[in-house]
Amino acid sequence: MTDSPRTSSANMPQTGSTTVQSATTKKKLGPVLVQLQHVNKWYGDLHVLKDVNLTVRKGEVVVMLGPSGSGKSTTCRTINRLERIDSGTILIDGKKLPQEGKALQKLRQSVGMVFQSYNLFAHLTILDNVTLAPRHVLHMPKDQAQKEALELLHRVGVDGQAQKYPAQLSGGQQQRVAIARALAMHPQVMLFDEPTSALDPEMVGEVLNVMTDLAHQGMTMICVTHEMGFARHVADRIVFMADGRVLESESPEEFFEHPKTERAREFQSKILGH
Amino acid sequence: MRSIGYLLTHYDVLGAFGVNLQLTAWSVLFSLVLGIILVLLRICPVRSLRLFATGFVNLFQNLPLTIVMVFLLLGAFVQLRFQFSSNFSTNFFWFAVTGLSLYTSAFVCESIRSGINTVPLGQAEAARSLGLGFFQSATLVILPQAVRGSVAPLGNTLIALLKNSTVASAAAVSTETSSLMNTMIQYNASSIVSVFLIFALGYVILIIPIGLLTTWLSNKLAVRR
């Protein structure tokens, strides 16, 4: 039951209490790693993040769910400051997120990011995509960077494509390379901004498998996704957002079996109803 | 009426084209370097540097080249007594290169900037999220793709530069093609059509390969997405 959470809860969806038990004992969580306190953001008059509070502990896998435009992607992007915030505080490993300059670069090294549209560097080979940042940011020697890159590419199952260019790979392969590229910087936390939304349905699984492996290896992850299976079985906690607010922050079992808010029930009925 | 053969043997036409090619070659080098610096300034996060580069580009894009040349001579040489060399023709050659480079760098900058617009925003976001700074993102990720995307406009700029090199006569470079053409017309007024044909054909022969080369290069170097 412990090694295969996927089948166990699929077989017994009604026994909510036992699965809650297993989820809480599944993993020992470390100290607080990412903390958002009273974060607000406006696009002009549009209030897109409304007093968002979020605490992520080391080793925790947080999945953010919610309807489009609910602010979940924006929240994810504020964590490495691809989006600036108008008020509030973001702490990473206890340190305040710097506004810009060298300190921000330093911090971004410890926060890996995977995008919906992969964003692999189109003019570089797969291998160079993965080694670029270690070589130029961490000043790692070329040999070592390539050795580590090939290990990472092997881990995500695309080591055979190292000399190809991104456009020669399928979407699923590109996204797995993007994960390897982010991992090459040895980040403390990984952000996934709808990593499977742009993929052909057949390729979603291979990316989710890599993410699941990563979760089981203890990586701290914040994932914005619409993959309910992944949310239910891999997440330690579901954060449900709507209209720029965090409405629920619960274990997956609690969230899916006993949603507290009307908005979350409505969301679930729409996506799980068919 | 003189034959084309007579004109070609009695005047150093090849030498004159050589001068234009030399002017162009040096100006390509300097305007590319300056153009890339300008484009870096135009996209950099520091507002004052952006403003400076925008001002520079707009100034040189909108000034006629002849005026740039004459201003350089009158201002830098006559007024400020600045000179590259005590040798007259060497001195004016480098003034012409300076004028051409300043002028062309503005167009190089705008060509590359048009290439930057072909690079998706996600490329810069990915670079930043990996911890690369502005300069590293620009030189390792954005510019390599932007330059590949701007080969065609850069080729057009190069063609314009080669033709513009005839304006070097305004900077008192007397050995280049348009000066030689004037001299030849002066002494062979009856053969004016032949003289025109020689220079027109000369430029066509030089420029058509550039056009073919840039078309080929822009396909070959295009970034596949």
Image: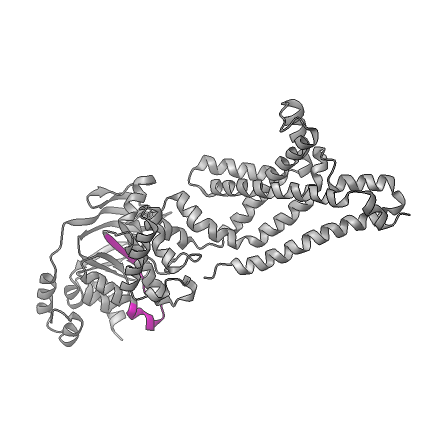
Quadrant housing residue B45: top left
Q: Position of residue A39 (x, y in %)?
A: 26, 47
State which quadrant residue A89 falls in: top left
Between residues B23 and A3, which one lies in front from this camera angle?
A: B23
Q: Nearer the viewer, residue A141 or B33?
A: A141
At 11% from the left and 57% from the top, the residue drawn is A28
Q: Position of residue A225 (x, y in %)?
A: 28, 63
Q: Which residues are magenta?
A: A189-206
Is residue B5 in the magenta section? no
Describe the colour scheme in one phrase.
one colour
Give the number of marks: 0
Coordinates of residue A45 in the picture (x, y in percent)? 36, 48
Point out residue B2 in the picture as x, y percentages from the top left corner.
89, 47
A226 relative position to B67: left or right: left
Residue A71 seen in render = no
Residue B200 visible in image: yes
Residue at image point 42% right, 66% down: A168
Depth check, front residue: A180 or A264: A180
Looking at the rendered image, the quarter that the C terminus of chain B falls into is: bottom left
The residue closer to the viewer here, A37 or A179, is: A179
Q: Is residue A188 above or below residue A272?
A: above
Does residue A241 appear left or right of residue B42 in this picture?
A: left
Q: Is residue A11 above or below residue A151?
A: below
Per the image, is A194 magenta? yes
Q: Residue furthest right?
A: B1
